[in-house]
Amino acid sequence: MNWDDTTDGAAGERLVGPAEERLVGSVADGEDQAVEAALRPKDLGEFIGQEKVREQLDLVLRAARARGATADHVLLSGAPGLGKTTLSMIIAAEMGAPIRITSGPAIQHAGDLAAILSSLQEGEVLFLDEIHRMSRPAEEMLYMAMEDFRVDVIVGKGPGATAIPLELPPFTLVGATTRAGLLPPPLRDRFGFTAHMEFYEPHELERVVHRSAHLLDVEIEPDGAAEIAGRSRGTPRIANRLLRRVRDYAQVKADGVITRDIAAAALAVYEVDARGLDRLDRAVLQALLKLFGGGPVGLSTLAVAVGEERETVEEVAEPFLVREGLLARTPRGRVATPAAWSHLGLTPPRPSGAGNGQQDLFGA
């Protein structure tokens, strides 16, 4: 069902799958990971965007190389798809060191972390994605490892347990998180360099699209790249995903060259509109505007209206809608903004009593 062709809600109909199945979702699936490996820049000079982060990180790495020492521990925060994993690989490449990649959810016990740390080589980069999801015992072990390059391995149980100190070679920890506020201060303070990854501007995403198109051997015109960039939600991962889908459309429906019209037609097929909203985003706005007059409405009620779980609406759709200024969260519930009415081409209802003075106010 297309929301543009109906005037009422689609309650009970599942509009899209989980976040990772959305074309404009920022979570990488297996195909994304394979393509990203081929498209990733290899050094800071190739990395597009994040100018301040690149400049600061370049100073950190150059100083470490000049001292002949390992680089300080690095914490990268920001939304998925902005390049945190790519920067960790660039750090290893710039330092001429191997990299080991793991994630917070994979480390559930202190022993899991001890096994990883004890096998590191001198100068190696350990990339720990979603570091805020690491278990508390492993987190406490990491404090000592980062600061003193030492861990205490507990052997035995009860009164007979013995702590055996294990010296570690100097290494660089690169932590990545989408929720920096969940990191405890003792862990956050042990990083020598912290950086927050910002969403990309359209002109930066145009450069990303042009670079990726060149690597994928796709012919693209400047206005075609601009059209894709404008619908990519400020995220390079989404820009690359949209580029691949537009490439497929251009190869099947046209001569293989991506122009503005081809890009717009292709993304219309995939229901990604000019502002990057997809089917779920528009469903939330349509329900909020048409069924509830723009709100306020409770999250649970809104989720039922679009046939989605509460968590899906709150964690998948709302962040982008709020960032775009199309939806506001208030103590009374969700409220649509004037920009939401304008984007969907709808007219806001006239406030009660507007134009009639006290007669409407008192019901006379």
Image (cartoon, grey):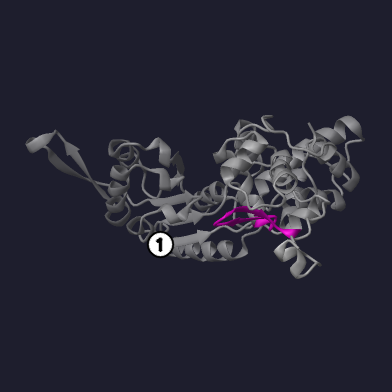
* Magenta stretch contains residue 30: no
Residue 310 lies, with reference to residue 350, above or below; the image says above
User: Of all residues shown, which one is farthest toward the bottom?
Assistant: 357
Residue on which the image places disc 1 = 192
Magenta highlight range: 323-338
Q: Nearer the viewer, residue 32 or 86?
A: 32
Q: Is residue 33 left or right of residue 178?
A: right
Q: Is residue 230 left or right of residue 316?
A: right
Residue 4 lies, with reference to residue 340, above or below; the image says above
Amino acid at dot 1: Gly
Q: Secondary structure at mark 1?
A: loop
User: Of all residues shown, which one is farthest toward the right?
Assistant: 255
What quarter of the picture does the N terminus occupy? Answer: top right
Q: Position of residue 199 (x, y in %)?
A: 63, 56
Q: Is residue 30 left or right of residue 59?
A: right
Q: Residue at x 71, y 65 (%)?
A: 361
Q: Is residue 126 visible?
A: no
Q: Position of residue 56 (x, y in %)?
A: 53, 66
Q: Is residue 319 left or right of residue 64?
A: right
Q: Position of residue 65 (x, y in %)?
A: 46, 60
Q: Nearer the viewer, residue 16 or 274?
A: 16
Q: Residues within 10 Å of mark 1 (few under 14, many from 20)?
A: few
Q: Residue at x 81, y 37 (%)?
A: 247
What quarter of the picture does the C terminus occupy? Answer: bottom right
